[in-house]
Amino acid sequence: MLGLSSLNTTLLATEISLNAQAAPGQTGTELLSIGCTAYSRQQTGELLALACHVCVDNSGELLSIAQMVKPTSDTELIQIGQQVLNPVPNRYMRARFAKGFDGEKYAIRIFVAGVELCNVVRTCEVHFAEDESATASLYLREPCGAIDLYQYYNRQIVIYAQTDKYLYPIFSGIIDMPKIDYSNRLRILSATKDRSKSVEALSIDTIHSIGYWSPSIFGEEQNYETKNAQLTDRLSTIPASFDFDAQGKAHLTSWLPKTVPDWTLNDCDIYEANMALEMSSAVSIVNRVEIELHHQFDRLIHREISFSYRYLNFMSDFDYIIRVAAEGPAPKLADVLSAANGGGWTTGEWWVKGTPPPGIYNGIRWKAADYKYDYQPTGEKDENGHDIVNVVQIPIGSDSNLYALAASWKAMRRWKQAIDEKYSIVLQNQESIAIHGEKKEKVIYSIKHESDNDKTARNWGSEKHYKRPKGTKQPNGDYTTNIDNIIAGEFANGYRVAVQIGYTKMLESHRQNSITMDCKFLPFASLTHTAHIATKRLNVNVKIAAYSHSWDFTSKRGKTTLTGKFFINPGSRKQTFSEAEPPAKRPQLPCEAYQQNFILKDYTVPYGVEVIEQDPNADKDEDEKEEEHQGNAIIIGKPKFKLYECNGYVRKETGYVYKGNKMKRGIAFRVPLPDIEEKSTDTLDVNAADQTLNLAIPHNEPFPRLTCLKK
């Protein structure tokens, strides 16, 4: 492909040639020299055959072949036969219009599909800029006659700047837009090094190492269609640019100009006729960002209520034995269990004392049983006209555990409550506000934890059996568990990303200050560099944000147009960025008070009083409810008894008297369980303490001056 050519001890590589970022004027150490004749065997595909001895200079670091030859898919510039270039032909560009070649003349070598373009290029331009694809434009002389439209289409192009000592890669890409200009007899070749394709070729680990990222702020990672989309989101969180150099290597570079520049340009290096200083638009300045951050999750609540009951407060078994005939037996255990297990509550930790076991108590033979009762009238009446009877107990079963003379238990209920913690975070820079006034933006973010992704939360509230308390005990007696770590550390991470996005916006708006100038050709220029502009018009360090090389092969002159950016924030003495702030302190979640212990009572319905079992207003609106004038008729003479308001054992007088005592028999055991208050079930909105962060925005004073010619 290179044809027959004699290398004749041509210097192939130096330390400088492998490092395009070397400062101008720095000499290189000879790494490898070959004294031989090289041949190209195109018919076999062999690019370079060496039949010789290789001499190595051991005085410096040896050349790593892995560094020189790196054929990796589309990032390969050219094969080894193309990297080992011929001696520079007699097509030199003028040295006094360039830096970095020690005053030597240089050549611009352009290869398309491995073939060098010789004496056909009129002018050439190469452009690099932050966050953009590198481009090149070539203007070729076209001879008269037929034109091969596809001669250069979709071919690889590589451009070098070379002397006998130095080799600078300038550009590598694909010719994607050939154009024929008939009026000027030109073929215009436009080439691009597609940045998005270079990003897609990176490993996902490389993408993950850049900036900050949160699924709550940017969405799930699997929703990204390209690596470039994720990289764009990550770059929005840091004040830095991510670019590829002329060799296709990726670099992450801070926006902040370095304290020690990579190189300096003085009056002799800059063409003053084409120099412009432009400041940020006052309209686009952002010096205050108000962030409203919502942290949303579910709180699991476990509540327990204790119940206790003792029939008529009997203190001994003998009390029960001698009074059961008139007062009636204690409530059946089955009735107590049925009443306790209702209303969405689950019971456990039961303790039950049954009626006295069979035996003789103070001469009275006793045997617990399930009875039915019969009454034998005596023919006498008491002072109120009630029949006095003898009670005949007819046992139908024998078991002292049929009844609950005393009982205690716990009722448990579990549910989820949605929590929305609201954080108000203000980012600001007082020095900028003092000059521009408040220029603010407001953004809203949400960090949401899906509790369905947590096994415990997924089944919370659907328990079929009593469970012991789980969680942290609160002052009101509840036990709570916050499901706020579905994605480990997501609150702190999402908070940091939200703050970083806002801070980066503020920094970016204060960085739109640029100096653009035409300079001598700078083959070592890179988007990673900081240049010190030391002229009578400016004195400032700038981070290179864009540069363009252009050559005129007729006049043999080349130049570089530089655009450098820097921060302007008068009043600020900061030269660095602020450190990342820790997350705000989370608020204490309130818990509603409730009655934790219930002592169940005994109720007596007077003889002849009507018993109302269901609340007639239970399903009615407020304006439909009937007026009520009477409470529970616990005292004789009240017309109605509201059974639905009772909380315990209810007995009713039978109308008979036994040994001077009115006889009663149980009709119901009720345990109305309380409803959970709405404040504990509705979404709980909690405002965290407001936070104001005063963040640094650096200032790089350019010290501009105007010089006037004396008339």
Image (spheres, rainbow, N blue to C red):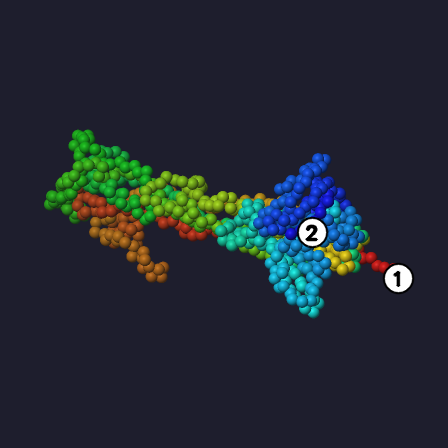
Task: Please name the residue that numbered disc 2 is placed on.
Answer: 160
Q: Earlier in the sequence, mark 2 or mark 1?
A: 2
Q: Tell me the amino acid under the disc marked 1.
A: Lys
Q: Which of 421/117 is in front? A: 117
Q: In this picture, is 366 found above or below 25?
A: above
Residue drawn at x 26%, y 36% as measured from the top left: 353
Q: Residues within 10 Å of mark 1 (few under 14, many from 20)?
A: few
Q: Quadrant of the C terminus?
A: bottom right
Numbered marks: total = 2
Q: In this picture, is 55 found above or below 618?
A: above
Task: Please name the residue that numbered disc 1 is placed on.
Answer: 711
Residue drawn at x 76%, y 60% as measured from the top left: 554
Asked which secondary structure carries label 1, the reply is loop
Coordinates of residue 60 in the picture (x, y in percent):
71, 37
The alpha-carbon separation of the residues under discs 2 and 1 comes to: 45 Å
- Residue 438 appears in the figure: no
Going by the image, does 362 lie left or right of 313? Answer: left
The residue sitting at the bottom extreme is 183
Q: Which of 306/575 is in front? A: 575
Q: Which of 101/516 is in front? A: 101
- Residue 459 appears in the figure: yes
Q: In this picture, is 645 found above or below 322?
A: below
Coordinates of residue 577 in the picture (x, y in percent):
65, 47
Q: Which mark is residue 107?
A: none
Q: Tell me the amino acid under the disc marked 2.
A: Tyr
Select label 2 or label 1 by which is in front: 2
Coordinates of residue 696 in the picture (x, y in percent):
66, 48
Asked which secondary structure carries label 2, the reply is strand
Q: Are marks 2 and 1 in contact (CB under 8 Å)?
A: no
Q: Residues within 10 Å of mark 2 (few under 14, many from 20)?
A: many
